[in-house]
Image (spheres, rainbow, N blue to C red):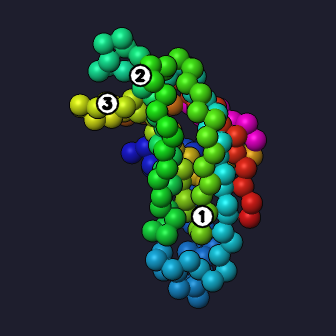
Amino acid sequence: MDLQNGKFLDNGGSGYILKPHFLRDIKTQFNPNKPPKQSDPVTLTIRLISGIQLPPSNHSSSNKADALVILELFGVPNDQTKQQTRVIKRNAFSPRWNETFTFIIQVPELALMRFVVESQGLITGNEFLGQYTLPVLSMNKGYRRVPLFSRMGESLEPASLFIYVWYVR
């Protein structure tokens, strides 16, 4: 559901999005497994600087999360990828990653970026802490605050990520 909510952020959640031109043109034979010939790829670079007041872990005895962030790119099969940060031990209040991730996106009109924050668990597996999804083309360049939401789509305010975004077309 978070992917659907993220897709409709671009138009204020009105429930209608005009398809990209290459999907509306009858003459175009779009195949998601092959990038379109008139494709204008985007190189998206995100520097994940820090987290702000991340939710505490339920599985930790000290209630402090061993935080990590997974950056997932959804879109056509050639664009789909996943990268993650290193783990910051016992600091959910203000973890600092300062890591840079680069994605080459063949069809940016259909791409969604999802930020997932987890707490590393060695025995029980990773615990979900929060997430946020948005269309790649609606990401503005510069320093940005990414709010986090629960699995149910509820705001976890003031929990957020601090990032720097830049891209080249």
Q: In this view, does 90 lie above or below 143?
A: above
The residues tagged by marks 1 and 2 sit, at their Cα atoms, a distance apart of 32 Å
Residue at image mark 1: 105
Q: How far apart are marks 1 and 3 (CA)?
A: 32 Å
Amino acid marked by disc 2? Ala
Magenta segment includes 24: no
Q: Which mark is residue 5?
A: none
Mark 3 and mark 2: Cα distance apart in space: 9 Å
Does residue 68 appear to the left or right of 60 in the view shown? right
* Residue at which label 2 appears: 65
Residue 28, picture quadrant: bottom right
Q: Residue 121: which numbered mark, if any?
A: 3
Q: Nearer the viewer, mark 1 or mark 2?
A: 2
Check if mark 3's residue and mark 2's residue have beta carbons within 8 Å: no
Verify whether residue 143 appears in magenta: yes
- Quadrant that contains the C terminus: bottom right
Q: Residue furthest bottom?
A: 27
Residue 143 location in percent, x, y? 73, 36
The type of residue carrying mark 1 is: Ile
x 47%, y 61%: residue: 80
For disc 3, the neighbor class at 10 Å (few under 14, some 14 to 19, many from 20) is some
Q: In this view, does 54 lie above or below 71?
A: above
Does residue 96 appear in this view? yes
Which quarter of the rendering shows the N terminus? top left
> Relative to residue 88, is residue 103 depicted above or below?
below
- The numbered mark, 1 or 3, whose residue comes first in the sequence reads 1
Q: In which quarter of the image is residue 121?
A: top left
Q: What stretch is highlighted in magenta?
A: 142-147
Q: Position of residue 19 (x, y in %)?
A: 57, 66
Residue drawn 62% across the image and 54% down it = 102
Q: Which of 114 and 58 is in front in this view?
A: 58
Q: Which of marks 1 and 3 is in front?
A: 3
